[in-house]
């Protein structure tokens, strides 16, 4: 199954499951990435990591390591930029 | 009410939103400290309008989970501290995520008022919130406010105070699905006897989430736990998810329905913030823009404004005094230059030497000339000498000329950088010593009649604080001990702190702006990749940049790091970057290595070694228990850009600067006085001394080098074995190192005093010679410049001085700081590799503390932005 780490810039996806445990998982959930959440991958930092996503109407940055805990489906090219 | 109602503001870690609110409400004059056991800041203050209302500013958090220290202190405060009411400040530009925290706060069984902050920004975006409807759905009052523009704040607090007085406890929202609510009800029935009714909902949910900290405090029996576990497992199997995730997801699902009901969203178009962000964190432009901003901050704070301002304070207010009138300054400069060019001091000493050779009695003549004020005896000595010299017809020939650092010059005006064992200049082929051909007795008398121009005699001169205070105390008839304590100990210590205020102020003006406008989190975003390799995060970058100017604000800048472990580690590592206080030492090493010629690679080498030291230490620290463990999640909100209001910006800066004065001030001050005592008291063990204990300077027959007999010297001797492996096992080196704990630049002046070099500076050839002689490997050092790094060792083990004190204050524990000090010092001692010039102390402060006896001119490190090569004026 694809993880958020593999989603390219400019694509959107839907969260299907969160793997991982403890603080990291809870933190990701607390920030609003839960099952069924719609995510737009906005950009990648100049050095290739971390990534910036739009989730629940705000900008969130997370490392690729952490993004790999987020399993996603329905990866698609975003219809228009700035929408999430 | 018997107890004053307590409010507490709470919000997500948006740039200083709750802090803005808190400052607006209280005028920022309350208590600032740490929560017990953690370096999370705790702020308390009373309301400007009603002193019965006490506010506590809780750290910005996203959730009441038990994972980060910020979340834990907030949670404990609400659950155990039972504040009278809670103000939940919600950032409406990000309302969905903010309401997530709100749903949790509503369950804590306290009266809650929700403040909708930044509604004006929302309107600009064309969005709207139905706050009445929201209030109904949340079951608590909702007030639209603007913390930045002080709008509606009194209503907000008034509502909170009313709710608190009436004890209108929030019931919490039924935000979960029917199955989960049923399960929560079952749990509530089981635990209802174990907690207060107000907290039943809170604990039911915590038990469902299997939050071990909360469950423990309930003290439930095994049967109770087992029965509830069945209920939880049933739902988990049904949903194929763990209970914590179920709770979180359902909270967000409920919030989504609230959003649909209360918020009118604007059609998705790029906001200004998004447009800015597209540029500044652009994949291509991001790094260059970031570097440009950092260079800008560095340049303004450390080169253009901050350091010159600090140098001015240190050199003028605390060292030499200054002119308020340009004419006075010009007149003095002219007279001083004319006096320097006439080489009167060379004439005097040259003539005395010639007279001695000619068999004239010169005993005590130089001392009599130097005495200030001269007694009748001194004048008689000089007159006798003049008569005798005249009689003997003494004429000095070929008297060498020196510059103001006491260095010999050649005829081209260059400094002669090689001295033989007796301190005589060694000339290179083709070089010729600059000399005064003849000095007659008449010249000698002229020289004596032309004393060094005194600034006090010129218009518009304002004396420095130490000089002025010395004058007052002498006039008041204070004893030498009191004068020395006040001037060298207290003013030296306080000055060391105050001298930094200009630099710290400038620095924080800029850092607070970057923080408040939202760029700081982009810095972390851009730099994270680099720092993560060493177990740090992108936010560690700013403190390190700042530390290259001065360690104290560097450590203070770590406050912008939210995570406690990262913050501590960064505070420990950041002082390893060489700061500007090390420049004189770098100049000294450079002098030893290169004999004053510009060796461009020496200074960059020190910085490189500092960076390598950080990396190695970071890797080592990660292996210690305190810093080991799971990596800290770097899941971070990137807030919208916005211009901070001048007022909140100013308050933010004031908060940081005053924190520096309070925290660093007390510790540095105490340390400075301590070092003063150590270096000025001791046993009179010199020849003719009576061996009694006391204030050395004032004792009978105390030599100029009285510090040899001080307590500091004793400690230095006892500890010198530690540094022996580094090649400088003398007590002088150790004592200098101890005094450099307070201020790195003290090292040069202390060293000068200990070796009887008087006012030699880092630019004096004689100082280089003495420095080189301290090393057993000095010869090698000179022969093999590529091995230069070993010279850096000498600067190594001197702890991290004042930043250490600052980091201790920041951490609130001396145990922590001693760990920091031992780790950096032991790294210095253990490592014989080339990474050594580790921790750095305060920067660029020339008003050093104790170890200079009064009368000894202090080493000035003013306006050094690069090691100055010794050049004649």
Image (tube, rainbow, N blue to C red):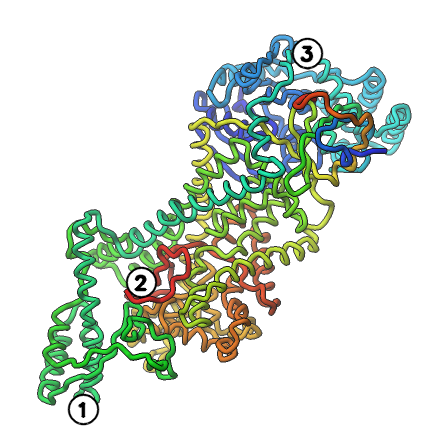
Q: Which residue is mark 1?
A: B359
Between B500 and B450, the one lying in front of the other is B450
Residue B475 appears at what percent x and percent y? 19, 57
Q: Is residue B124 visible?
A: yes
Q: Is residue A72 left or right of residue B767?
A: right
Sort mark 2 into few (<14), some (14-19) or many (20+) by Cα contacts within 10 Å.
Answer: some
* Quadrant location, the N terminus of chain B: top right
SS for callout 3 = helix
Measuring 87% from the left and 29% from the top, which residue is drawn there?
Answer: B229
Q: Earlier in the sequence, mark 1 or mark 3?
A: 3
- What chain does badge 1 belong to? B
Q: Residue at x 18, y 59 (%)?
A: B334
Answer left or right for B733 relative to B263: left
Q: Quadrant of the C terminus of chain B?
A: bottom left
Indicate the position of residue B433 as horizontal and vertical percent values: 28, 79
**Placement of B665 over or under B729, stated as above or below:** above
Callout 3 crowding tier (Cα within 10 Å): few <14, some 14–19, many ≥20: some
Q: Is B17 located above or below residue A22 in the figure?
A: above
Q: Quadrant of residue B466?
A: bottom left
Q: Nearer the viewer, residue B44 or B688?
A: B44
Q: Position of residue B4 (x, y in %)?
A: 52, 24
Question: Distance between the Cα atoms at labels 2 and 3?
Answer: 72 Å
Query: Picture coordinates of residue B230 (x, y %)?
Result: 90, 27
| Residue hosting label 2 | B481
Q: Nearer the viewer, mark 1 or mark 3?
A: 1
Q: CA distance from mark 2 to mark 1?
A: 41 Å
Q: Is residue B205 visible?
A: no
């Amino acid at each position: 199954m694809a993880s958020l780490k593999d989603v390219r810039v400019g694509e959107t996806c839907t969260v299907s499951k969160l793997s991982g445990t403890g603080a990291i998982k809870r933190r990701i959930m607390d920030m609003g990435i839960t099952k069924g959440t719609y995510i737009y991958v906005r950009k990648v930092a100049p050095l290739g990591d971390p990534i910036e996503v739009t989730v629940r109407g705000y900008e969130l940055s997370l490392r690729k390591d952490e993004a790999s805990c987020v399993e996603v489906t329905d990866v698609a090219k975003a219809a228009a930029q700035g929408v999430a | 009410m018997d107890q004053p109602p307590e409010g507490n503001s709470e919000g997500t870690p948006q740039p200083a939103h709750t802090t803005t609110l808190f400052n607006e409400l209280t005028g920022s004059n309350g208590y600032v400290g740490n929560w017990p056991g953690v370096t999370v800041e705790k702020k308390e203050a009373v309301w400007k309008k009603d002193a019965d209302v006490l506010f506590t500013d809780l750290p910005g958090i996203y959730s009441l989970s038990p994972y980060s220290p910020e979340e834990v202190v907030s949670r404990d405060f609400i659950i155990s501290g039972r504040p009278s009411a809670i103000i939940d400040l919600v950032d409406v530009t990000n309302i969905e995520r903010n309401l997530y925290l709100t749903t949790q706060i509503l369950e804590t069984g306290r009266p809650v008022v929700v403040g909708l902050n930044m509604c004006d920004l929302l309107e600009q975006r064309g969005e709207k919130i139905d706050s009445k409807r929201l209030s109904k759905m949340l079951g608590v009052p909702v007030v639209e406010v603007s913390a930045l523009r002080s709008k509606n704040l009194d209503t907000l607090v008034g509502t909170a105070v009313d709710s608190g007085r009436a004890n209108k406890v929030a019931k919490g929202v039924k935000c979960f699905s029917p199955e989960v609510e049923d399960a929560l009800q079952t749990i509530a029935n089981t635990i209802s006897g174990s907690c207060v009714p107000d907290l039943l909902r809170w604990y039911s949910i915590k038990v469902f989430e299997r939050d071990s900290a909360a469950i423990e405090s309930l003290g439930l029996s095994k049967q109770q736990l087992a029965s509830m576990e069945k209920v939880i497992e049933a739902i988990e199997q049904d949903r194929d998810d763990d209970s914590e995730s179920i709770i979180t997801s359902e909270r967000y699902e409920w919030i989504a329905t609230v959003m649909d009901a209360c918020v009118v969203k604007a059609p998705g178009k790029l906001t200004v913030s998004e447009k800015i962000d597209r540029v500044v964190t652009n994949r291509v432009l991001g790094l260059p823009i970031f570097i440009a901003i950092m260079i800008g901050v560095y340049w303004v704070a450390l080169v253009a404004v901050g350091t010159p301002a600090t140098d001015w304070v240190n050199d003028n207010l605390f060292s030499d005094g200054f002119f308020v009138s340009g004419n006075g300054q010009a007149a003095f400069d002219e007279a001083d230059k004319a006096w320097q060019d006439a080489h009167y001091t060379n004439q005097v000493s040259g003539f005395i030497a010639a007279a001695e050779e000619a068999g004239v009695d010169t005993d005590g003549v130089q001392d009599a000339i130097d005495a200030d004020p001269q007694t009748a005896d001194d004048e008689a000595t000089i007159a006798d000498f003049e008569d005798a010299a005249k009689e003997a017809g003494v004429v000095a020939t070929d008297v060498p000329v020196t510059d103001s650092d006491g260095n010999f010059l050649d005829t081209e005006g260059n400094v002669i950088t090689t001295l033989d064992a007796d301190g005589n200049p060694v000339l290179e082929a083709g070089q010729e010593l600059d000399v005064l051909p003849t000095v007659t007795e008449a010249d000698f008398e002229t020289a004596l009649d032309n004393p060094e121009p005194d600034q006090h005699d010129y218009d518009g001169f304002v004396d420095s604080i130490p000089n002025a205070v010395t004058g007052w105390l002498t006039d008041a008839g204070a004893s030498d001990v009191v004068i020395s304590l006040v001037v060298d100990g207290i003013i030296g210590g306080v000055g060391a702190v105050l001298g930094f205020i200009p630099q710290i102020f400038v620095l924080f003006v800029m850092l607070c702006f970057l923080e408040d406008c939202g760029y700081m989190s982009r810095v972390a975003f851009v730099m994270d990749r680099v720092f993560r390799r060493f177990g740090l995060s992108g936010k560690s970058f700013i403190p390190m940049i700042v530390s290259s100017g001065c360690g104290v604000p560097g450590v203070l800048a770590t406050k912008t790091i939210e995570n406690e472990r990262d913050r501590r580690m960064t505070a420990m590592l950041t002082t390893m970057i060489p700061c500007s206080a090390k420049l004189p030492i770098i100049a000294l090493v450079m002098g030893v290595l290169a004999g004053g010629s510009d060796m461009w690679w020496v200074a960059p080498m020190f910085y490189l070694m500092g960076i390598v030291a950080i990396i190695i230490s970071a890797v080592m620290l990660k292996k210690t228990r305190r810093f080991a463990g799971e990596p800290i999640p770097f899941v971070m909100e990137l807030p919208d850009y916005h211009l901070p209001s001048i007022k909140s910006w100013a308050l933010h800066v004031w908060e940081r600067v005053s924190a520096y004065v309070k925290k660093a001030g007390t510790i540095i001050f105490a340390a400075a006085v301590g070092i003063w005592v150590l270096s000025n008291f001791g046993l009179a063990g010199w020849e003719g001394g009576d061996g009694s204990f006391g204030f050395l300077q004032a004792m009978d027959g105390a030599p100029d080098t009285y510090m040899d007999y001080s307590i500091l010297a004793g400690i230095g001797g006892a500890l010198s074995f530690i540094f022996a492996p580094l090649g400088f096992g003398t007590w002088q080196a150790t004592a200098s190192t101890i005094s450099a704990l307070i201020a790195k630049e003290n090292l040069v002046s202390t060293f000068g005093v200990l070796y009887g070099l008087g006012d030699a500076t880092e630019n004096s050839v004689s100082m280089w010679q003495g420095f080189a002689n301290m090393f057993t490997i000095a010869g090698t050092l000179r022969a093999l410049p590529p091995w230069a790094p070993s010279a850096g060792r000498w600067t190594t083990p001197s702890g991290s001085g004042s930043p250490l004190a600052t980091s201790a204050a920041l951490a609130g524990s001396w145990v922590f700081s001693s760990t920091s000090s031992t780790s950096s010092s032991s790294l210095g001692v253990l490592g014989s590799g080339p990474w050594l010039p580790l921790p750095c102390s305060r920067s660029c402060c020339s008003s050093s503390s104790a170890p200079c006896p009064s009368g000894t001119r202090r080493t000035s490190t003013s306006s050094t932005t690069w090691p100055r090569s010794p050049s004649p004026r």
